[in-house]
Image: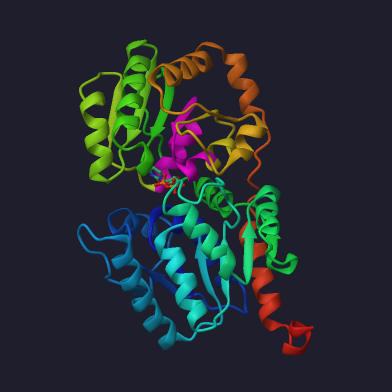
Amino acid sequence: MVVLGTRPEAIKLAPVVRAMDASPSCEPYVVSSGQHREMLAPMLTALGLKAHTDLAVMRDRQRLAGLTGRLVTALDETIREERPDVVVVQGDTTTAMCGALAASYERIPVAHVEAGLRTGDLYDPFPEELNRRLIGRLARWNFAPTERAAAHLRAEGVPEGQVLTTGNTVIDNLQWMLDRGEGEPAFRTGGKRILVTLHRRENQGGGMRGIAGAVRRLADRGDCEVLLPLHKSPAVRESLLPGLSGHPGITICEPLGYPDFTATLAACDLVLTDSGGVQEEAPSLGKPVLVLRATTERPEAVDAGVARLVGTDPGAVFAAASRLLDDPSERDRMARAVNPFGDGRAADRIVAAMVRDCLRPPAARDG
Ligand code: UDP
């Protein structure tokens, strides 16, 4: 049973579902929690995924505790009806944490895709870091995207046999999508192309208003085209639109479909983002990334030299972006860095490990 609820979960679990479909030993059953229904539905279509069950648990202005209660209850019912052999969750959402908890209550082994990411601060980002750590305690299989993520898990005492470094499935999916060649870049001019995506809760309000100021100054240079596919969250829109609307050098659009987004990423010169997934996708296409956050649970790209952590201070964002726009050799140096997030075969490793361990006779398993 593959449990997902948001756009990035669909992106990162689609390759796992495909690998299960290709395995004679697996039958995937996809459950959608509908956590971000509006952005999830078109993504499922673009990825060729269909949810077998859709849980209607979201309420307006819900509190985290209420959502958690409803999700665990609804997932418990689905799990008891379907009796899956394994429950697969991804990342750090409330959906993922509830999937792991509901499965554990029924003693069904949990597989955690993209395990071991840590900022080191239990409450930052909240509730993501909390969710990741809880899932790490529950999972039978922790599929770490990098050696660093695997090391976090080992340092927390997760037994060696429960940690496997696989690469990140986001790369599998990016390659799959680009190979299909279905998308079109959304840029319209021949200037320097800057792709901006923002959505993180910690940046909403003051952080995003500051970033908007910096982006407007970049557009004022006159040699760039800024493209901002705008997240559906009302708080994101309220934070960004006043500062960015009405500038001829800034194109604001609805979230792009995945085929167009990946084609746009492949066509850009520079990425400004607070997104986790985009931080991973851009390096694999050799695109320099400025990470607009104070901290990142993906320091691998910074260490590899393809990403820089610049925060949200308007002066710092403008200076870092201008430097890259003005110095092609600096951009090239970043673009040549080796992508640290895997080779695009993570999902095969994940499914092979689950099949191997599930099919092993109980005696061998216990031994
Ligand atoms: N994405 C997309 N259309 C867009 C912006 C992003 O398809 O307009 C995809 C992108 O490929 C990436 C994922 O959505 O893999 C990132 O989602 P988001 O930034 O919402 O979440 P995060 O990765 O930070 O959890």
Q: Where is residue 89 in the image (x, y as percent from the top left)?
A: 50, 66
- Quarter of image, ligand 1: top left
Figure quadrant of residue 159: bottom right
Q: Can residue 25 be seen in this view?
A: yes
Q: Vertically, is 90 above or below 100?
A: above
Q: In this view, does 140 lie above or below 314?
A: below
At x 49%, y 18%, the residue is 320
- From the viewer's perspective, tell me whether residue 47 is left or right of residue 306: left
* Residue 199 in picture, x, y percent from top left: 36, 41
Q: In this view, does 293 lie above or below 124?
A: above
Residue at image location 46% in from the left, 41% down from the top: 262
Identify which residue, 103 or 306, lies in the foreground: 103
- In which quadrant is the C terminus drawn? bottom right
Q: Is residue 117 left or right of 271 when viewed as pictured?
A: right
Residue 150, magenta (yes or no): no
User: Which residue occupies 68% across, 70% down?
Assistant: 353
Q: Where is residue 284 in the image (x, y as percent from the top left)?
A: 60, 39
Q: Quadrant of residue 354?
A: bottom right
Q: For the view shown, which residue lies furthest in the front direction?
A: 122
Q: In which quarter of the image is residue 166?
A: bottom right
When the figure is inspected, residue 246 is found, relative to residue 170, above or below; the finding is above
Residue segment shown in magenta: 258-279
Q: Number of marks in the image? A: 0
Q: Is the magenta stretch mostly helix, strand or loop?
A: helix
Viewer-nearest residue: 5 or 139 = 139
Which residue: 31% across, 72% down? 70
